Image: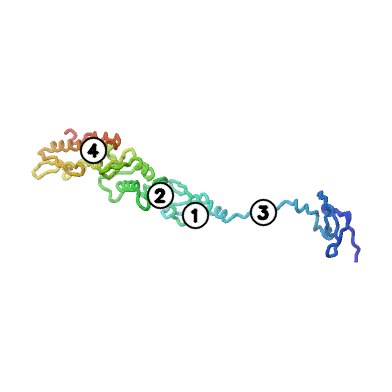
């Protein structure tokens, strides 16, 4: 058996052996060592560990060793965020949607890939199902859309008055069952957006105790065929009924509102407050027309004065100057 070699005075790493210490529990030699790090305490280390390089300091090298940076794995939400940004789907109306930002499944910023480029926060599940509605989808005669704003088309599944008026206006202009009276009529581009129309309607609407309210486009501008904020006004139906297109409807070149008798006489008649008023019988058409025109002008002015405090000044002036309008509608009788 070889003699034990004393390690006193030898240096291993940062440790310098000072003296022999007690054997360990396996009867192996140990040594008291001083560390060059400045630690005043002696440390007891095994001889074999010193020689094999298993220990090199009092522990300071381990404590001072730079910690290995942990690589944080991305969370499931982060992975979804990376994967889903840029994802595209079509909604049930055929509008293409694209994800711009993804915070979590309940906060997804999308953009509709159409002319309006409308953005909104949606639920990812609804994005996948395609149940998200585009407020700028032109669903009404390829023109009208709801837009984004405070005005709703319905409340508790009942259409709002604004929406009813807006839709009927489009039906009159573009519907399959378009009346002859509205042939060639259009809605201005500003009112394609329901929000714009609804605000105008809300700001101008008022109630009449006797007659239902209607949108008039003809009184302010003679011959107007475009529904627009400048031309239109909300009026009682009694005012709208004054605008019968004289001469527009003829029977064998005979003017409406003049009844032709079998004896060759002329009987002018006028609708007043929903009732037909006979104005007499005349042998001369010019005389019959003069009676009709005089009665109609008086009636329209009577209606104008009745609603003077409720209608606009421009409408009031147009009604009070109804004689000028009649001259345009019936040019062949303008001088009568």
The residue nearer to you, when weighing 246 against 26, is 26
Q: Secondary structure at mark 4?
A: helix
Q: CA distance from mark 4 to mark 2?
A: 42 Å
* Secondary structure state at the residue bearing disc 2: loop
Contact between labelled residues 3 and 1, with CB atoms less than 8 Å apart: no
Q: How many marks?
A: 4
> What kind of element bears circle 3?
loop
- Nearest to the eye among marks 1 and 2: give it: 1
Badge 4: how crowded within 10 Å, few (<14), some, or many (20+)?
Answer: some
Give residue 285's position: percent from left, percent from top: 13, 38
| Residue at image location 82% in from the left, 59% down from the top | 49
**To which residue does mark 2 refer?**
137
Residue found 33% across the figure and 48% down from its top: 164
Above/below status of 324 relative to 150: above
Disc number at residue 303?
Answer: 4
> Which numbered disc flags the more N-terminal residue, 1 or 3?
3
**Viewer-side label of 4, 3:** 4
Q: Nearer the viewer, mark 4 or mark 1?
A: 4
Q: CA distance from mark 3 to mark 2?
A: 50 Å
On the image, the x and y values in percent for residue 147 come to 41, 46
Please give left or right for residue 111 compared with residue 35 in the image: left
Q: Earlier in the sequence, mark 4 or mark 1?
A: 1
Mark 1 or mark 2: which comes first in sequence?
A: 1
Q: Residue furthest bottom?
A: 1
Marks 4 and 3 sit apart, C-alpha to C-alpha, by 86 Å
The earlier-in-sequence mark between 3 and 2 is 3
> Quick one: 154 or 215, which is closer to the camera?
154
- Which secondary structure lies at badge 1? helix
* Residue 124 tag number: 1
Label 3 Cα crowd, 10 Å radius (few <14 / some 14-19 / many 20+): few
Q: Which residue is mark 3?
A: 70
**Separation (CA) of disc 1 from disc 2:** 20 Å
């Amino acid at each position: 058996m070889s003699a034990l070699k004393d390690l006193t005075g030898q240096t291993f790493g940062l440790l310098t052996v000072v003296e022999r210490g007690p054997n360990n529990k396996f009867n192996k030699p140990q040594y008291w060592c001083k560390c060059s790090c400045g630690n005043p305490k002696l440390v007891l280390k095994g001889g074999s560990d010193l020689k094999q390089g298993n220990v090199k300091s009092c522990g300071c090298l381990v404590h001072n060793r730079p910690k290995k940076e942990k690589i944080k794995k991305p969370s499931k939400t982060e992975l979804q965020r990376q994967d889903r940004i840029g994802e595209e789907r079509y909604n049930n109306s055929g509008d293409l949607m694209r994800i711009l930002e993804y915070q979590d499944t309940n906060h997804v910023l999308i953009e509709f890939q159409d002319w309006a480029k409308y953005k909104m926060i949606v639920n990812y599940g609804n994005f996948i199902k395609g149940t998200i509605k585009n407020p700028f989808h032109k669903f009404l005669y390829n023109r009208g859309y709801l837009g984004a704003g405070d005005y709703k088309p319905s409340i508790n599944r009942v259409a709002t008055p604004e929406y009813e008026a807006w839709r009927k206006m489009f039906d009159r202009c573009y519907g399959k069952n378009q009346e002859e009276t509205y042939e060639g009529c259009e809605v201005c581009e500003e009112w394609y957006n329901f929000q714009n129309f609804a605000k105008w309607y809300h700001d101008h609407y008022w109630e009449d105790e006797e007659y239902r309210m209607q949108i008039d486009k003809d009184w302010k501008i003679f011959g107007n065929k475009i529904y627009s904020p400048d031309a239109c006004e909300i009026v009682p139906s009694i005012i709208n009924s004054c605008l019968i297109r004289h001469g527009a409807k003829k029977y064998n070149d005979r003017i409406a509102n003049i009844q032709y008798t079998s004896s060759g006489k002329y009987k002018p008649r006028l609708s007043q407050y929903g009732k037909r008023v006979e104005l007499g019988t005349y042998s001369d058409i010019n005389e019959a027309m003069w009676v009709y025109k005089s009665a109609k002008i008086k009636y329209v002015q009577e209606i104008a004065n009745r609603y003077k405090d409720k209608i606009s000044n421009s409408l009031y002036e147009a009604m009070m100057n109804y004689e000028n309008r009649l001259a345009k509608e019936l040019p062949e009788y303008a001088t009568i």
